[in-house]
Amino acid sequence: MRYGMVMAGGSGTRLWPLSRRERPKQLLPLLPENRCLLEEAVDRLEGVVEPGNRLVCTAERFRRAILESISSLDDEHLLGEPTGRDTVNAVGLTAAILEGRDEEAVFAVLTADHLITPKDEFARALDLGFRIAEAEPTRFVTFSITPDFAATGYGWVERGAEVEGFEGAYEAASFVEKPERDRAEAFLASGRWNWNSGMFVFSAKGFMQALEKFLPANAEGLRRIAAAWDTPERKATLEEVYPTLTRISVDHGVMEPASASERFHVTTVPMAVKWLDVGSWPSLAKTIEPDAGGNRVIGRLFAVESRGVLSVSSDPDHLVCTLGCEDLVVVHTADATLVCPIELAEQVKFIAERVPAPLR
């Protein structure tokens, strides 16, 4: 059976002060009709995964806020991590639980902080990924994005030979994480390389077999948690075992060694989509239509002789005014206000890490 899991554990420090430790970016109403990124990510499974088979893996402290925000999600479909142990364990926890319930379980791993359009192209690629993993449980699928510039902040994956019987799917020949500018430009020019999206499809059984081979202690701990999942010992076992698991990403912990192993095969399915990581103020600005002066607004802005201003307010009645400003970020909340040049906006996370605890 098909399942979908959305990873939603990030705090989004580059979107401070709107995003806080207890109010992560994936729950902020930044999209049209006050929708949040997590709601968008869960709905992205429509037509491919049944509503009752959709899961969210997140920090336990976000449980109440997420359940209040996502009406289609209930308590049993939220996997709460007592502490973050990176993506291999979020994926592994999902795999171990699903394997115990359904030996044929195949699940997608999606991210909660991206905007992806068009939806029909995403659904086409996701369905192809499911069919590949259903046919061969030891074949792991990663989705790659057709690039439109030489990005140095993303990972890249090289397309190899097309997978027999699955048009549009390719062997993953190699991976490179965040290349230098010259190398990224060569990748773009070659036409063989795509951005690595951080989204996957796995057979639950196949993923656990990979964990047993590459991270056996993690596999043992996750199976112990899964065995207690539907018992009164769930919480105690999770809190005892999960923090002891080796912390590593799914890319480094499973995908890279699997791509070099004869036992497992890594496939990439390219998506011809517009893919935007909404992880900083400049990236959020790209989702907002500019006015005649290039200013972008959430809330209210009175701009005089100002250009390229991003103004965001958590209070729809609060008026932000700018005079003679250019390429500036202004973010207003009830207890904190951020003002910075847009070229420094990626460094906002350093403020978020240093402000007094109540404001983090």
Image: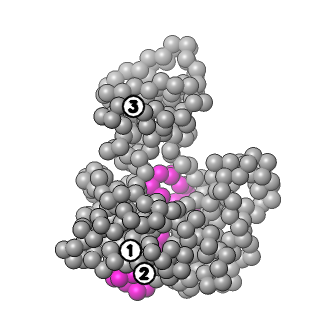
Labelled pair 1, 2 in contact (Cβ < 8 Å): no
* Residue 148 shows up from this direction: no
Q: Nearer the viewer, mark 3 or mark 2?
A: 3
The disc, 1 or 2, on the residue closer to the chain's N-terminal end is: 2
What residue is disc 2 on?
105
Label 3 sits on residue: 355
Quarter in which the C terminus is drawn:
top left
Q: Which residue is found at the position 53% from the left and 55% from the top?
A: 116
Quarter of the picture containing the N terminus is: bottom left
Q: Report x, y in % for residue 154.
A: 63, 52
Q: Could you tell me how far apart the alpha carbons at marks 1 and 2 are, in whole angstroms?
A: 20 Å
Q: Amino acid at mark 1?
A: Gly
Which is closer to the viewer, label 1 or label 2? 1
Quadrant in which residue 42 is drawn: bottom left
Judged left or right of residue 97, residue 134 is right
Amino acid bearing label 3: Val
Label ID, residue 221: 1
Residue 238 % position (x, y): 30, 68
Separation of residues labelled 3 and 2 (CA atoms): 44 Å
Q: Is residue 342 above or below residue 129?
A: above
- Kind of residue sitting beneath label 2: Ala
* Residue 224 in view (yes/no): yes
The quadrant where residue 70 appears:
bottom left
First in sequence, mark 1 or 3: give its number: 1
For the record, the magenta segment spans 98-121
Which of the two residues, 250 or 245, is positioned nearer the viewer here? 245
Q: Residue at x 27, y 77 (%)?
A: 228
Give the mark nearer the N terminus: 3 vs 2. 2
- Mark 1–mark 3 Cα distance, whole angstroms, equals 36 Å
Measured from the top left, where is residue 17 in percent x and y? 40, 33
Contact, mark 3 vs mark 2 (Cβ under 8 Å): no
